[in-house]
Amino acid sequence: MIYGIGMMLGKALSFLLIPVYTRYLSPKDYGILELLDITGYVLGFLFGLGLDQGILKFYSQYDESQDKSGVLSTAIVFNLLLGGVLVLILLPLSQHFSQYILGAPDYTYLFILLFICLLLESVLAKGKTILRAQHRSVTFTIISLGYTVSAATLSVFFVVGLGLGLTGIYYSALICSFLFSTYLILNILKSTGVRVHWLKLKQMAAYGVPFVPVGIFAFILHWSDRYILNIYSNIETIGLYALGYKMGMSIVMLIAVPFLFIWNAYLFEIEKRPDAKQIYASIATYFVLAMTLGGLVLSVFSRELIAILAPKAYEDASRVIPIIAVAMIFMCSEDVFQVGLLIKGKSMYIALSKGIAAGVSVLFNIMLIPRYDMMGAAITVLVSMATFCAIIIHFSQKTYFIHFEYKRLGKIAAAALIVFSLTSLLNSENIWSSIILKTGMVALFPVVLVALGFLNFEETAILKRWHEQIRGHVWQN
């Protein structure tokens, strides 16, 4: 809950920046920002080298505090050295990145800022991963919110106050990542000491490096369509698609990310329980339920959200939100279905699954984007994510079989589809009337779930007990 509160507050601040960016940045500027961000995303995996996963796994495996400190210190020192070398390699190539990605050398300075930010943000990410491994959710949330508030404030100052545009956004990221990463890492190293354990580094690298191609394949799944859109369409379309994609993906930040912060640290401890498989199955069902509800709300109110947050020039962005929201449900569901692969240390199957899905993504993007523009890109994301989820389930079940509640998952999907279909029949020119009507329809979602027989015996008994307690309390007062 602490992780969730922190992420929701952080996301709320990010949403407040959307009207600022869309009013002070044109769709073309927004498209350039998107291409810079996704370039940073794929390069970020080289800076991290999968050590975040290694920290979470091996920190929990050691019992002695000296060994735990060795894991943390080794990860930090190696990350600093690796990041420094990569920045020295990338800086002379900044103009080439600008030319080949954005079509002109005019944005070289932005790439220079990007590369420096990548180093600082990778160090900050290691520090935050360490907080997760230590279950220090309050400190993690304070650091995350502090960074978000500071970056948002500086962004507004640079973009609105000084009129620096895209450069101002990267100035704010550079300043905040430097300050917060320095504070966090110095405090961690103060308690662990500065040591490098080569055996621990080898163990973490062996486990974490397979996640690097996973990240690259994830890049292909999520963001390669921007590059293909840039070939067959234009940067303005990328800006519209990026805003719609960001809105559709917000359920990941609001629901999935807070859950995964704690889930990835605890799933290995749950394995020790005799009822582990039952717990894994139940958590998968409730997680999909939460994601589906979030996706339903986004899909139903997609037009209204864009109308409130952005100028009229961005209104077409709402068309892709429902498709992206469903794709994100598939994407995040694999995190609860891949438990067997993580427990058995078969991370190579995750890479293989994403590799296959990435191939599907490239194929469909090439086929659909020239004909359907950004809608083709959105459909490709949905197909690719569904493919990835299906393959992950196949490999994970062969490795560590769990009786997932497939019938109940089907009822969740059916209830969401029924409610979305009903709301699509509602048409009102007045945005606030539309919001009121659609809110009433979305409220039917739990009713439809119950009507479809979603609740099991235990859940029904719990709800009856709650009802009796509430009723008794009301009568007493």
Image (tube, helix red, strand yellow):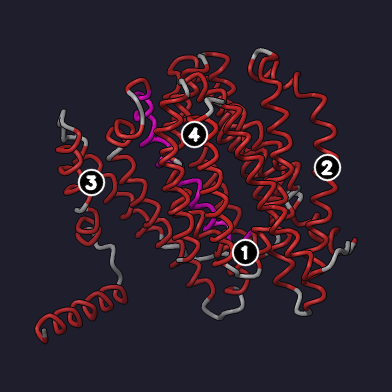
Give SS at disc 3.
Answer: helix
Q: Which residues are magenta?
A: 314-341
Closest to the observer: 104 or 164? Answer: 164
Per the rendering, the mark at residue 419 is 3
Front disc: 1 or 3: 1
Residue at 55% in and 81% down: 274
User: Magenta region, mostly helix, strand or loop?
Assistant: helix
Give SS at disc 4.
Answer: helix
Give SS at disc 2.
Answer: helix
Instruction: Name which residue type carries label 3.
Output: Val
Front disc: 4 or 2: 2
Instruction: Name which residue type carries label 1.
Output: Arg
Closest to the observer: 223 or 354? Answer: 223
Residue to which mark 2 is pinned: 84
**Alpha carbon separation for disc pair 1 and 3:** 37 Å
Per the rendering, the mark at residue 132 is 1
Q: Residues within 10 Å of mark 2 (few under 14, many from 20)?
A: some
Residue 266 horizontal/vertical position (percent)? 58, 69
